[in-house]
Amino acid sequence: MLVTSKRLFDAALKSKFAIPATNFVDQYTLRAYIAVAERQQLPLIISFAQAHNEVMPLEEAAVLGRYYAELARVPIVLHLDHGEDVDFVKRAVDLGFTSVMIDASQDTLDENIRKTKEVIAYAHEKGVVVEAEIGHVGSGDNYENHDHSDSIYTTVEEAKHFYQATNVDSLAISIGTAHGNYVGLPKINFERLHDIAESVAVPLVLHGGSSSGDDNLSRCAGSGIVKINIFTDIMNGAVRNLIVEGKSYFDIQEQMRAGMEACLQHYYHIFKTKSVNL
Ligand SMILES: [Zn+2]
């Protein structure tokens, strides 16, 4: 069933678990994710990133995402990941996404607040929830080393100020992870996470979850983080043990499905995700 994340996040905060947010880029990724969610009887956030608009246009993502979410026997959130401009985010709202992220984390704090408020006014009108980001979880060309990424840690003061100004539904914070692959394990600033979770009553989101270390992620899931984004590990899982020689197109797809499913199943366990009755 297609839902918003509102009550899922309430349950996650209360029972100290996180829900995986997995990026889909076609119907095969969607099918794999939802198959695992149904098998485990757990909620799931299926995310479509604006950056993948060239792989699959937003309109197509909305149709497929809604189709599979409505068909599912577990709660599924259709989420826009890293909406970079307000018009694109509004289109996602119009197309039936139940949750949207406006990522103005590289703007000034005031501009981030302004854009977030504009999106919230538009989205809430239609019952759609909004995620914003402050601080900045690094990305771009340099995925290899977090020390050299452009990440900026979120401060408690900024988080407080931002939440008071916007009343946003969930907030992505930067506490040491980065998008993409790492060399070694990132160092998570749990003290900062604790301080933010204590002072701001908003569900928190962790980006760049892939390969951040199972212990790290499990600890985040019990410390105020209710949504953890996983993409790189799933893509790596799809192709890691791929045998192509002598295999048919269907054989290859089957191997990729199994690899993606195993990865999501693993993270459900690490995030301690629980079933939620809506
Ligand atoms: Zn992200």
Image (cartoon, grey):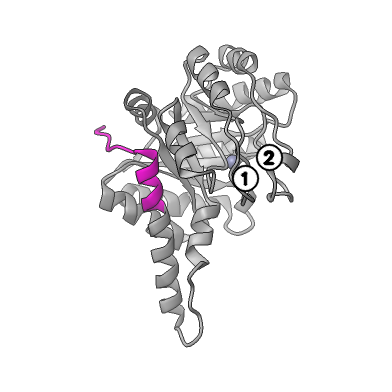
Look at the image and tell me whether residue 187 can be seen. Answer: yes
Task: Judge by depth and name the residue closer to the eye, 100 or 14.
Answer: 14
- Quadrant location of the C terminus? top left
- Could you say where residue 25 lies in the image, as x and y percent from the top left? 52, 57
Of labels 2 and 1, earlier in sequence is 2
Q: Which residue is mark 2?
A: 138
Mark linked to residue 179: 1
Residue 134 location, quadrant: top right
Of helix, strand and loop, which one carries label 1?
loop
Residue extending farthest to the bottom is 246
- Could you say where residue 203 lies in the image, as x and y percent from the top left? 46, 24
Within 8 Å of ligand 1, the CB of disc 2? Answer: no
Residue for point 53% across, 48% down: 211
In the image, the segment drawn in magenta is 264-278
Would you say the residues marked 2 and 1 are in contact, meaning their CB atoms lie under 8 Å apart? Answer: yes
Task: Judge by depth and name the residue closer to the eye, 202 or 79.
Answer: 202
- Could you say where residue 72 lies in the image, as x and y percent from the top left? 30, 50
Residue for point 68% across, 49% down: 143
